[in-house]
Amino acid sequence: GLGSVISGGDFFNGFRYGAISSAFNHVEHEIIKQTEVATIYFTTDGVGHTFLEIDGTVYTYGRYGARTPESSGDLAPSGEGILHKYTGKAAKNYIKSVTSKSEYFSYKVSIKSKQSVHEYYNSLIKNGQSVDKYTYNVDTYRLISNNCTTHSLNALRAGGAEIPFIITPSGAYQYFFPPQNYELIYSKWGPKY
């Protein structure tokens, strides 16, 4: 066949090349089948925000002041660590609400296990306190060590993504979107630590 034409008319070399090509194609398709995807979102308003969407479920963590409003806001360095878990229409509405009000960027991240990402967040929920249908007080938020970015990236790592330690939305954004135009990205985000 075509393999023997490519190999100069030698049927056996053509067969060998065809078999090797077929094997590589099979491996490539198996790798693609094993790769799962989560979407990470970054917003640029205020100090920024990072959240995940996976399988139609949104996980968003921050200082939302669900129980004590004084623990929310850009200037509070610590407070209630509130996790919202939205599914279905509520998840779509959350994404629409955030992306319509803020400049945002999203990135599809290859992971090995979507289930492990869900388990990461479900473990936080299980060990936290339910506030309402979508809201859980899961830990103490700390601006420079336990925030929306650290939880989002820890969840992706739990799912098998190899991501370095990053603590800010701007740092995560710059990791996922290597700046070709660093000045523009820097001026948008500024050094917000």
Image (cartoon, grey):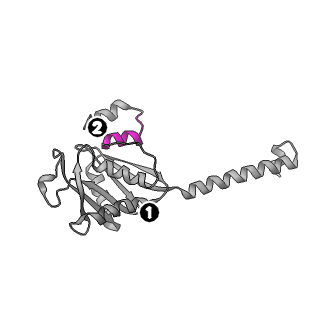
**Kind of residue indicated by mark 1:** Gln
Left or right side of 10 for 175: left
Residue 180 x, y percent position in the rendering: 42, 33
**Kind of residue indicated by mark 2:** Trp
Mark 1 vs 2, N-terminal side = 1
- Looking at the image, residue 51 lies above or below residue 179: below
Total tally of numbered discs in the picture:
2
Q: Which numbered disc covers residue 115?
A: 1
Residue 150 x, y percent position in the rendering: 32, 48
Q: Residue furthest right?
A: 10
Residue 18 x, y percent position in the rendering: 77, 51
Spatial CA span between label 1 and label 2: 32 Å
Hey, which quadrant is residue 171 in on the image? top left
Q: Nearer the viewer, mark 1 or mark 2?
A: 1
User: Which residue is located at x 25 percent, y 51 percent?
Assistant: 101
Residue 10 x, y percent position in the rendering: 88, 46
Magenta stretch, main secondary structure, is: helix
Q: Which numbered disc covers residue 93?
A: none
Question: Which residue was labeled with disc 2?
Answer: 189
Query: Which quadrant, please, contains the C terminus?
Result: top left
Query: Are the residues tagged 1 and 2 within 8 Å (C-beta)?
Result: no
Q: Residues within 10 Å of mark 2 (few under 14, many from 20)?
A: many
Q: Secondary structure at mark 2?
A: helix
Q: Is residue 10 magenta?
A: no
Q: Residues within 10 Å of mark 1 (few under 14, many from 20)?
A: few
The magenta-colored residue range is 168-179
Left or right side of 62 for 12: right
Left or right side of 184 for 47: left
Left or right side of 182 for 3: right
Nearer to me, 44 or 121: 121
Q: Secondary structure at mark 1?
A: helix
Q: Residue furthest top?
A: 183
